[in-house]
Image (cartoon, rainbow, N blue to C red):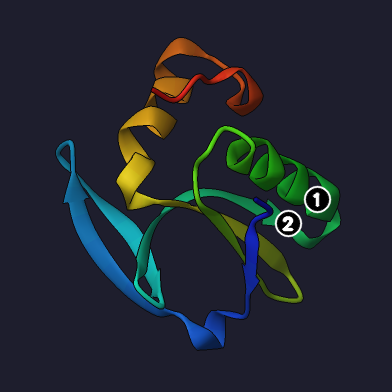
Amino acid sequence: MYPLVLSPEVVSTFSFWHEGVLQKGISSGKELYGFYKKFDATQRQEAFSTAVSLSETGIEVCITCLPTEYKVWVSLRKLEQVALCFLSNTRPEELVIT
């Protein structure tokens, strides 16, 4: 499944507490997403590549696009699996979701 590409005007923002840190989130439809990574407008290809790699592991992903930046967001349903990427230095495409 490919990442959903959304305009920031069509999402609702919120904050949530996760592992002792206040996090940024957005909602679209019935799905809640947590912030994953921000990219400058010049890093468009990297932003989409990251989002596709995450989505290929079974994680629902969306990208919000502005003229100056791209933000990748991951489903809060899979937040723990995404955190494993950071802890183990695993690239998203190497992550195995069980």
Give x and y (percent) for residue 12: 38, 80
Q: Quadrant of the C terminus?
A: top left
Q: Amino acid at mark 2?
A: Asp
- In the image, taking residue 32 as reference, residue 86 lies left or right, namely right
- In the image, taking residue 67 as reference, residue 97 lies left or right, namely left
Give x and y (percent) for residue 58: 53, 38
Give x and y (percent) for residue 59: 49, 42
Please tell me which residue lies in front, 4 or 14: 4
Q: Residues within 10 Å of mark 2 (few under 14, many from 20)?
A: some
Res 88 quadrant in image: top left
Q: Amino acid at mark 1?
A: Gln
Identify residue for label 2: 40
Identify residue for label 1: 43
- In the image, taking residue 67 as reference, residue 92 lies left or right, namely left
Instruction: Name the residue rendered at 40%, 22% in the picture.
Output: 84
Query: Are the two marked residues, 1 and 2, in contact with CB atoms closer than 8 angstroms?
Result: yes
